[in-house]
Amino acid sequence: MAEHEPGVAVVACVRDEELNLENAVRSALGQDYSGELDVVLAVGPSHDRTREIADKLAAEHPQVHVVDNPTGSRSIGLNLAFAAAPADREIIVRVDGHTAFEPDYVQRGVAALLESGAVGVGGLMSPAGRTPTQSAVARAMSHPVGLGQASFHVGGEAGPAETVYLGIFRRNAVDAVGGYDPTIFRAEDWELCLRLRRAGGMLWFEPSLVVTYWPRRTFKAVAKQFWRTGMWRREVVRREPTTASLRYLAPPAALLALGVSVPTIAVGVATGSAGILLAGLAAPMAYSAVVLAGTAHAALRRPRLSLRSALLVAPVVVTMHMAWGAGFLRGLTARAAVDHRA
């Protein structure tokens, strides 16, 4: 590292983060980093004590700053946080209210950024759970059967990447492309990384950077998250068709195949045709085999899950796939398009 460490601003857009916010901020304040470091929280409308906790932390620590984000939009909130960071903070470290990281995270990230010459560096999302359902969600999110083979989910070698998880960015590079797109409320990080790459910047995956992520705690919350993510992913693909990939198209394709199988099975049963019945059963059987094999492998990985959590991994994966696929097929609704909290 250089003798004079560049100034860093850790930024987060938060709402409804009463359970995790204090831990997230304290993990930022506890960084073993010799340069100047500030924390900027853009706080949106919440139904819990998020704002109270943010204000308390700001009162206790002069390097914590709170700005209002009345829209609740992540993109808008992150832009507000970027703008509120002290002008001499050359590096922006994005975090979430439901994440935590080791004391050397910023030091390692800044070193990787400077050594690689990249405009943005990111590491590995490490989902963790406190309850059986949350633990099952965490395991599903860190296995290819859940979210595909992206390196920040399943790991890999250090090197150039298409996108980064959360991200440690050169501030001037983000400013040069106009920050986050305020019209995109999900997949905003992927879209920003796309513009950074198109502007000639390189993004870098550094597997030694590990962020603990606390996922949703209930099936309803998981379904809602993935439904909305599916809708916004389709919107990104509509705007940028080159971003379509098997990872994003597999869930809607599976949902369509399963949907077609229902009337096919009904016709096979009604007509007594074994051929039609088998054709109808092909998609459900193939999908079930993939899910059961994948979730069995996920559940048996170390550290071992409790029996209850292990049994929940398969239904969690199906919920994620079907909600994403349904959201993608439905497309961006008028309500979601104007609801910045979607």
Image (tube, rainbow, N blue to C red):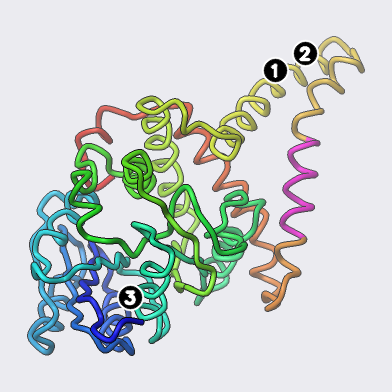
Q: Could you tell me residue 37's position as x and y percent?
A: 20, 80
Question: Which quadrant of the rendered structure holds the C terminus?
Answer: top left
| Quadrant of res 80 | bottom left
Q: Closest to the observer: 293 or 92?
A: 92
Per the image, is 304 magenta? Answer: no
Which structural element holds mark 1?
helix
- Left or right position of 260 against 177: right
Residue that carries the numbered disc 3 in the rendered image: 20
Q: Closest to the observer: 287 or 32?
A: 32
Label 3 vs label 2: CA separation? 51 Å
In percent of the image, x 16 and y 76: which residue is there?
54
Amino acid type shown at disc 3: Asn
| Mark closer to the observer (3, 2) | 3
In percent of the image, x 34 and y 29: which residue is there?
332
Count residues near mark 1 (Cα–Cα under 10 Å), then give few for <14, some for 14-19, many for 20+: few
| Residues in magenta, as a range | 285-296
Residue that carries the numbered disc 1 in the rendered image: 263
Question: Which quadrant of the rendered structure holds the N terminus?
Answer: bottom left
Q: Could you tell me residue 107's position as x and y percent?
A: 36, 81
Which structural element holds mark 3?
loop
Label 2 vs label 1: CA separation? 6 Å
- Left or right position of 171 against 193: left
Label 3 vs label 1: CA separation? 46 Å
Q: Could you tell me residue 166's position as x and y percent?
A: 37, 61
In percent of the image, x 65 and y 53: which residue is there?
144
CB-based contact (under 8 Å), mark 2 and mark 1: yes
In percent of the image, x 28 and y 69: which residue is there?
17
**Residue 281, above or below 213:** above
Q: Closest to the observer: 242 or 126?
A: 242
